[in-house]
Amino acid sequence: MQVTDHIFSIPAEQAFYTGPQSPNVFLVRDGDEAALIDSGFGDEPSVKERLDFLAEHEGVRVKYIVLTHHHFDHSSGAAQLRDATGGAVALHPQEEELLRDWQSKAPQDIEVPEEMKELAEKVETFRKQAAEADPTIKMNDGDEFSVGDLTLRVVHTPGHTLGSVCIYIPQERALFTGDTALGLGTVAISPPPHGDMALYLESLERLKTLDSALMLPGHGQEVHDVPAKLQELIDHRLAREEQIVGLIRKGKRTPKAMLSTIYPELDKRMLPVARRQIEAHLAKLESESRVAQAGDEWTLV
Ligand SMILES: [Zn+2]
Ligand SMILES: [Zn+2]
């Protein structure tokens, strides 16, 4: 699917239960040079669909496969796409260990309880595939890649994960945001060491300073009013933060006690993720000396 003269979205059937939103994979092309932004899932049909799409772009050479972060919905197709195209895989150094250590407990975008055996096995396979991506390019903030006459600029945006990056193409005023900003809804932010709410909000503020006219997220539809979308995401987090402060004031002093008020209708399977969101906010508030922890309980400072 063509988004602009130089940007295409490469669709694939949903390989895995991800709620309504499959991961996006984008092709950036200028002349005979190209880069992929993220790789999607590593199951055979997904990889085949991406490669079939590339085959339609005759004469195009994939120079880079840029991974916005290590999560397996974005990275498990990378090894196969690299083998098929020769593109070099690029990842932020803070993501590399997380990518390689497929047995780590680092939270992923999709978490299934161990008792759901079939899905848990699928996750294991995806994580093993992701570990084989073998990124040979360590990309850091400010690094630039050229694809024809286009510049792909790396913007380090820690928060969702600590090594999450966005890619900005000034010639297109296009911003690829991975899971830092989604097309619809909000992304999970874990408390340190896996994520960081304070850094996340700083990252969103930083993205607002770019002159983007098009946002291409890791999940969901592209966004055209980018500053408004980023502000909406910031406002949502700040409102949640104030809600948490209010709950502590009312005597709901543990994340568990806050859960049912903040997420009254949540699917049971989502509770651990929801709880980590609250803990991420509390960690930010603690770093600002607005709350303090004593045992399980949180109090206002
Ligand atoms: Zn994701
Ligand atoms: Zn993610």
Image (cartoon, rainbow, N blue to C red):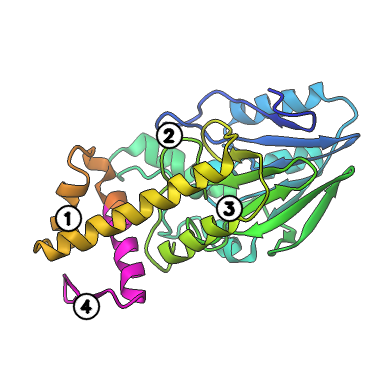
Q: Residue at x 68, y 64 (%)?
A: 141
Instruction: Give x and y (percent) for residue 203.
Output: 54, 59
Badge 2 or badge 1: first in the primary sequence: 2
Q: Which residue is mark 2?
A: 18
Q: Which residue is mark 3?
A: 208
Q: Residue at x 73, y 63 (%)?
A: 142
Callout 1: 10 Å neighbours few (<14), some, many (20+)?
A: some
- C-alpha separation, residue under disc 2 versus residue under disc 4: 39 Å
Q: Please check the rendered image and state whether residue 286 is part of the magenta-colored stretch, yes or no.
A: yes
Instruction: Give x and y (percent) for residue 272.
Output: 27, 51
Region rendered in magenta: 275-301
Report the amino acid beneath label 1.
Met
279 over 152 or under it: above or below: below
**Helix or strand or loop: what does disc 3 sit on?**
helix
* Nearer the observer, 239 or 279: 239
Q: Which residue is mark 4?
A: 301
Left or right: where does residue 145 sit relative to residue 237?
Answer: right
- C-alpha separation, residue under disc 3 versus residue under disc 1: 31 Å
Badge 3 or badge 2: first in the primary sequence: 2
Callout 2: 10 Å neighbours few (<14), some, many (20+)?
A: some
71 over 158 or under it: above or below: above
Q: Please check the rendered image and state whether residue 89 is part of the magenta-colored stretch, yes or no.
A: no
Report the amino acid beneath label 4.
Val
The reply to whether callout 2 and callout 4 are in contact (CB within 8 Å) is: no
Q: Residue at x 52, y 60 (%)?
A: 101
Q: Which residue is mark 1?
A: 258
